[in-house]
Image: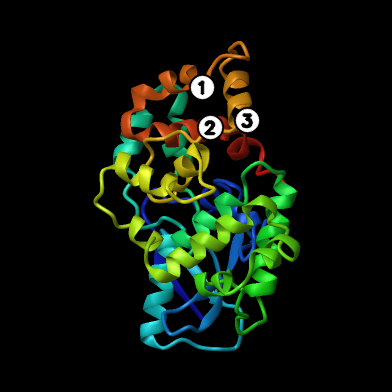
């Protein structure tokens, strides 16, 4: 089954897919040759549908089901809405692009159609993955996320494992997460976050539509054990809030390299540079340090 969905005028699928490392983590499957993305989408009915999305024409995206199954009209509408959310195709970046055009250094951004950061189907998944990026190599992050999907995720109609629901992680144990998932010290944090999400004492899916001031939302995200300033700042970017930079050692090093600055300066030096961009500063920061991905190719 194939169909298409409308994309914004300045939308570039490949820039979105390679906006950060999420496309290399399960349950996403990045096809570099065809510049497409595979993802099992979990519908409200509980059905897991394997979907592949690629560029089409005239500001449309081509959607293909990676199985012989078909969708009802209602399911087709739900898949379209989920894909627009994952690809950030429903986010208005007009003001951001206007700001970028004011600065010669950043005029490449609207020309390239960059700025949309790929996110997971749920804020729960994004948060778990972000916790899995802390204090470890990318290889270990990938292993943890793959283990979560393989061991706890529901299988789609073509056998691909989706990311586990909060209930699946909540029903596991700290020992299981340490040994089988290789989560290490993150195990109790993941377990507590999943159980709080199931109980409703934390509602990560509400974060995406919250009217809460960004400062308060940042504090709420930070209240999740295992989520420090770096993780919270980057989670907020996936919520459409760009007020925080989310600095880690890699970004810190890249900033000082591209700006020919002396290493060893404090993070406040970086923060001061991006103050000029107001509520978009976190997005300018990220595109600054990853510009070469758009010019020279996505790593990995």
Neighbours of disc 3 within 10 Å: few (<14), some (14-19), many (20+): few
Residue underneath mark 3: 249
Q: Nearer the viewer, residue 290 or 236?
A: 236
**With respect to residue 156, does 254 lie above or below?**
above
Q: Secondary structure at mark 1?
A: helix
Look at the numbered disc 2 and give the secondary structure of its residue. Answer: loop
State the count of labels. 3
Measured along the vertical axis of the image, is residue 247 above or below residue 90? above
179 sits to left or right of 157 = right
**Residue 56 in the figure: left or right of residue 240:** right
State if disc 3 and disc 2 touch (CB < 8 Å): no
Q: Position of residue 186 (x, y in %)?
A: 62, 53
Q: Residue at x 49, y 36 (%)?
A: 246
User: Is 261 situated above or below 2?
Assistant: above
Quadrant hosting residue 149: bottom right
Residue 77: x percent and y percent? 37, 77
Q: CA distance from mark 2 to mark 3?
A: 7 Å
- Of labels 2 and 1, earlier in sequence is 2
Residue at label 1? 267
Nearer to me, 198 or 79: 198
Relative image position of residue 145 (x, y in whole percent): 65, 60
Report the residue marked by disc 2.
Answer: 247
- Residue 166 seen by the camera: yes
Label 1 Cα neighbours within 10 Å, binned few <14 / some 14-19 / many ≥20: few
Q: Residue placed at 48% from the left, 31% from the top? A: 285
Residue at the top extreme of this rendering: 262
Q: Relative to the observer, which residue lies in front, 200 or 50? A: 200
Q: Earlier in the sequence, mark 3 or mark 1?
A: 3
Classify mark 3: helix, strand or loop.
Answer: helix
């Amino acid at each position: 089954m194939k169909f298409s969905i409308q994309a914004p005028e300045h939308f570039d699928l490949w820039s979105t897919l390679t906006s950060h490392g999420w496309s290399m983590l399960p349950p996403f499957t990045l096809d570099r040759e065809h510049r497409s993305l595979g993802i099992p989408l979990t519908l409200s009915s509980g059905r897991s549908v394997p979907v592949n999305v690629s560029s089409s024409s005239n500001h449309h995206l081509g959607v293909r089901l990676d199985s012989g199954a078909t969708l009802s009209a209602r399911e087709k509408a739900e898949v379209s809405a989920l894909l627009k959310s994952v690809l950030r195709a429903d986010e208005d970046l007009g003001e951001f692009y206007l700001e970028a055009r004011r600065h010669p250094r950043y005029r490449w951004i609207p020309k390239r159609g960059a700025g949309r950061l790929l996110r997971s189907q749920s804020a729960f998944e994004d948060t778990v993955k972000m916790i899995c990026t802390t204090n470890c190599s990318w290889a270990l992050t990938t292993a943890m996320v793959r283990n979560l999907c393989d061991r706890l995720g529901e299988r789609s109609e073509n056998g691909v494992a989706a990311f586990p629901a909060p209930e699946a992680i909540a029903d596991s144990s700290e020992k299981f997460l340490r040994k089988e998932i290789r989560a290490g010290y993150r195990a109790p944090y993941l377990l507590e976050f999943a159980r709080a999400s199931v109980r409703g004492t934390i509602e990560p899916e509400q974060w995406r539509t919250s009217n809460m001031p960004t400062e308060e939302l940042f504090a709420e995200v930070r209240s999740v054990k295992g989520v420090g300033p770096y993780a919270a700042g980057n989670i907020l970017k996936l919520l459409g809030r760009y007020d925080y930079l989310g600095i880690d050692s890699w970004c810190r090093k890249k900033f000082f390299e591209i700006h020919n600055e002396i290493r060893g300066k404090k993070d406040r030096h970086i923060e001061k540079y991006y103050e000029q961009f107001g509520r978009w500063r976190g997005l300018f920061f990220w595109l600054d340090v990853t510009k070469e991905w758009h010019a020279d190719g996505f790593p990995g």
